[in-house]
Image: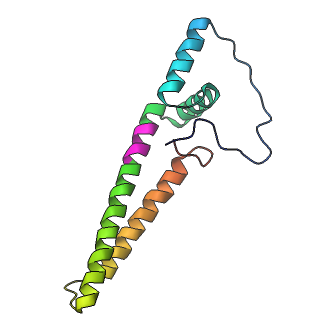
Amino acid sequence: MSRKRQANVPGGRPVRREVKLTDAEDTALRFAAAELNITVPRYLKEAALASSRGETLTERKALLQHLFELQRQLAAVGNNLNQLTRAFNADGTVGFDLARTLDAVRDSVATVNDTLESLALDGDAA
């Protein structure tokens, strides 16, 4: 589950901007933020910063969801390989290098974790 509010940062956020909206614009912003389960200020900030990077909030959210699913699948495969390694080591028969395969899965999970962290704004994944 993602956070509604942004993570705290050292020194806080001293800069404040004022935005004047019509009732209809305010309603539209509240609705858009609610769809992503975030606050309106966070929505405005992320939308502005995302457009400068050439990505939309929708694309970012879809990418993060895909990466989280990949992370979950890799973790499940790693768990299964670990169980197989224990079983084969108990019998003393190892048909192939399960430990090397498990290390490769762990490296893949670490890569996914690093990617998720680099994509997250303020260290807070969508």
Q: Position of residue 120 (x, y in %)?
A: 55, 46
Q: Position of residue 25 (x, y in %)?
A: 57, 11
Tally the numbered discs: 0
Is residue 89 shown left or right of residue 109? left
Query: Against 110, is 83 above or below?
Result: below
Whether residue 108 can be seen here: yes
Foreground residue, 34 or 15?
Answer: 34
Residue 92, by quadrant, is: bottom left
Is residue 53 shown left or right of residue 103? right
Q: Position of residue 89 (x, y in %)?
A: 28, 88
Which residue is found at the position 51% from the left and 25% from the top?
34
Whether residue 56 can be seen here: no
Residue 8, by quadrant, is: top right
In the image, residue 65 lies in the stretch drawn in magenta? yes
Residue 107, by quadrant, is: bottom left
In the image, residue 68 lies in the stretch drawn in magenta? no
- Report the coloring of the rendering: rainbow
Is residue 23 shown left or right of residue 64? right
Foreground residue, 70 or 84?
Answer: 84
Q: Position of residue 69 (x, y in %)?
A: 36, 50
Q: Main secondary structure of the magenta part?
A: helix
User: Residue lying furthest bottom in this view?
Assistant: 92
Query: Against 102, is 2 above or below?
Result: above
Which residue is found at the position 61% from the left and 7% from the top?
23
Which residue is found at the position 33% from the left and 62% from the top?
76
Which contiguous range is marked in magenta? 60-66
Foreground residue, 8 or 52?
Answer: 8
Which residue is found at the position 35% from the left and 54% from the top?
70
